[in-house]
Image (tube, grey):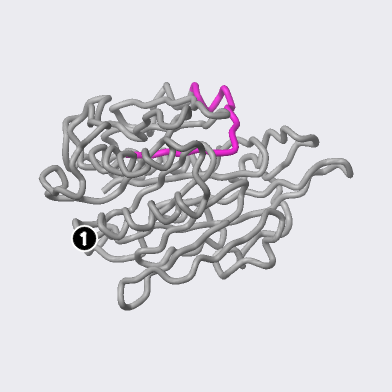
Amino acid sequence: MCELLAMSARYPTNLHVSMDELARHGGGSGPHRDGWGVAYVQDRDALIVREPDAAHGSRQLAFLQARDPTSTIVLAHVRRATQGALLLRNTQPFNRELGGRLHLFAHNGMLPGIESDRRFRAGWYRPIGDTDSEHAFCALLDRMRPLWDRGEPSLDDRMSAVVAFAAELRQLGPANFIYTDADVVFAHGHRRRTDAGTIEPPGLHVLCRRCRGDHEASLEQEVALVASVPLTDAPWRPLDEGQVIALREGHVIRSVAVTAANRPSEIVSAPPGSHEQTSGLESAIAQNATSDARTAAGPTARSFGAGS
């Protein structure tokens, strides 16, 4: 199965350590050598680089990392193919335009039968490749399209649509995914295949961190990371099975869990700048910067740095 990584930050930053570790999983220390991709959101668009080859040792990825791109939203994926040939069109993250902005999607899991399931029938959006993951993305955007036809939808409307979609997708199989509309990052944790071969939760982990700059006038950087497996020694927290979170500017701003009756629980909201007031997902924040986590002074802070 594949591995996912996403970042939401208050100010533009790079993503070195976590991206380097994800790349090692992509054919070095891990078996996910069938393709990789990363997208750096820029306003309503994104810089996207994909390659149907191993991330580990990739000259394209090395060049990209040397260029040091920064963003407030990053989405990355390394592939271990279970469906579809090793071609660019089957390499994630996938992207489509909706509402005058680029939407991005990456999935980890297996969704047998999605192509013939009436709930996920391809409509306005059609897959280019041959994967169940891209089919799921097209089905999600078909559901989101009526919301965006009326202008930018509210966060509650978007969250409700993603939660309902995730609940149906889970019925097909492991359905971990990360989706962004260039404003909010939505992450759904389900189940994934372990090293022992079992399929069980957690499917995703989250880490929220805070870093102060070295200068009195500098601004405080806040970053939230989501990954299939912890990529650093920091205190990552697993998402509950079926949990959906929404991230903006480095914060978990919504969280919907699933009850024993398979119904969504209450939505938890967290305003920007209130890490201490949020639920358990954000209780393990690193309050002080590590030696390799730096924040540049000014409103375009370049780096949460190698510590991310």
234 sits left or right of 88 in the view:
right
Q: Is residue 116 above or below residue 275?
A: above
Of all residues, the one furthest to the bottom in this rendering is 260
| The C terminus lies in quadrant | top right
Q: Give SS at disc 1.
A: loop
287 sits left or right of 79 in the view:
right
Task: Tell me the quarter of the picture where residue 59 sits.
Answer: top left
* Residue shown at the point (33%, 53%) measured from the top left: 176
* Residue shown at the point (37%, 31%) measured from the top left: 95
* Residue shown at the point (49%, 44%) measured from the top left: 153
Of all residues, the one furthest to the front in this rendering is 150
* Residue shown at the point (21%, 39%) measured from the top left: 81
Q: Is residue 298 above or below residue 179?
A: above
Amino acid residing under circle 1: Gln
Nearest the eye: 185 or 27:
185
Asked if residue 213 is among those painted magenta in the image, a careful observer would answer no
226 sits left or right of 188 in the view:
right
Q: Is residue 28 visible?
A: no
Residues drawn in magenta: 63-78
Q: Is residue 125 visible?
A: yes
Task: Tell me the quarter of the picture where residue 75 sits.
Answer: top left
User: Looking at the picture, how far across and down is residue 266, in whole percent?
Assistant: 48, 70
Nearest the eye: 94 or 59:
94
User: Looking at the picture, how far across and down is residue 189, in whole percent?
Assistant: 37, 58
Q: Is residue 192 above or below residue 114?
A: below
Q: How many marks do you count on the picture?
A: 1
Asked if residue 68 is among those painted magenta in the image, a careful observer would answer yes
Q: Is residue 156 above or below residue 242?
A: above
Nearest the eye: 143 or 300:
143
- Which residue is tagged 1? 171
Q: Residues within 10 Å of mark 1 (few under 14, many from 20)?
A: few
User: Looking at the picture, how far across and down is residue 118, in whole percent?
Assistant: 14, 48
